[in-house]
Structure formats: C-alpha cells, structure tokens
Image (spheres, helix red, strand yellow):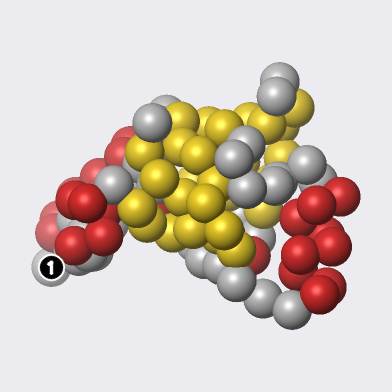
C-alpha cells in the first residue's frame, strides 16, 4: 500500500493531475474549467461564473474574456494555480479557478 501511495503522489507532483482524476468530456471538446487545464497549456478565457465580487476581482487581475493565459503550475495539496497573464505571474485559488471557463488554443 505504501508503494502505491508513493507512486500516485509522484505522478501528481510531476504532471499536476492525479491518476485517478477523471477527465471530463468537456476537456475533449476543447472547453473546460481553468482548474482542469494541464500544466504548460495556453488557453483563452471564455467566461466566468460568479457574482459581482468575482467578476470585479478577475477584471482587476486582467482576466477578462478573450484573454490568453498559460498555466504554469498546480500547487500540491489543494494549493493555488500559478498562471501567466501577459508576462505577469498570478496565483489563483482553486475555487476561483473552478469558476473560469476556458478553451484550448
């Protein structure tokens, strides 16, 4: 059991995805949540779900629909995502990243 756990943990740290995670059908169609985007991929923001506060915060960070962003890394243990927006590195919490809908470029 210990060996199996170490193998899964190493796979997660190297790829950013846990091997048991299911990739949804939306991933295959080209649209997905920012949270599900693989490391190193560049995506375009389509829309985001949330109230005025979420929209205002994302707009302040420069994350508007139509903007291209690159996922730099997924922090382990439920930590934030590191993304690149126009040469700036930003850390986004997983809750906010789950609200942003993106498409593959």
Q: Position of residue 39 (x, y in %)?
A: 41, 36
Mark 1, residue position: 1
Answer left or right for 55 relative to 40: right
In this rendering, is residue 3 above or below 90?
below
The single residue placed furthest to the bottom in the displayed view is 51
- Asked whether residue 82 appears in the rendered view, the answer is yes
- Quadrant housing the C terminus: top left
Q: Residue drawn 70% across and 46% down? A: 63
Q: Residue drawn 46% across and 37% down? A: 43
The single residue placed furthest to the top in the displayed view is 87
Answer left or right for 62 relative to 81: right
Q: Position of residue 100 (x, y in %)?
A: 56, 59
Answer left or right for 50 relative to 73: right
- The image quadrant that residue 96 belongs to is bottom right
Who is closer to the viewer here, 16 or 63? 63
Q: Position of residue 32 (x, y in %)?
A: 37, 56
In this rendering, is residue 69 above or below 95?
above
Q: Secondary structure at mark 1?
A: loop
- Quadrant housing the N terminus: bottom left
- Asked whether residue 94 appears in the rendered view, the answer is no
Q: Residue drawn 71% across and 20% down? A: 87
Q: Residues within 10 Å of mark 1 (few under 14, many from 20)?
A: few
Q: Residue drawn 36% across and 38% down? A: 104
Count of numbered badges drawn on the protein: 1
Who is closer to the viewer here, 90 or 58? 58
Q: Position of residue 74 (x, y in %)?
A: 49, 46
- The image quadrant that residue 47 belongs to is bottom right
- The image quadrant that residue 41 belongs to is top left
């Amino acid at each position: 059991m210990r060996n199996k756990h170490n193998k899964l943990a190493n796979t997660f740290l190297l790829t950013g995805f846990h091997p048991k995670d299911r990739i949804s059908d939306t991933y295959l169609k080209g649209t997905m949540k920012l949270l599900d985007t693989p490391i190193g991929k560049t995506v375009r923001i389509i829309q985001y779900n949330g109230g005025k506060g979420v929209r205002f915060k994302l707009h302040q960070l420069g994350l508007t629909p139509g903007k291209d962003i690159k996922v730099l890394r997924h922090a382990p243990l439920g930590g934030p995502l590191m993304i690149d927006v126009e040469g700036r590195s930003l850390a986004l919490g997983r809750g906010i990243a789950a609200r942003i809908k993106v498409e593959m470029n």
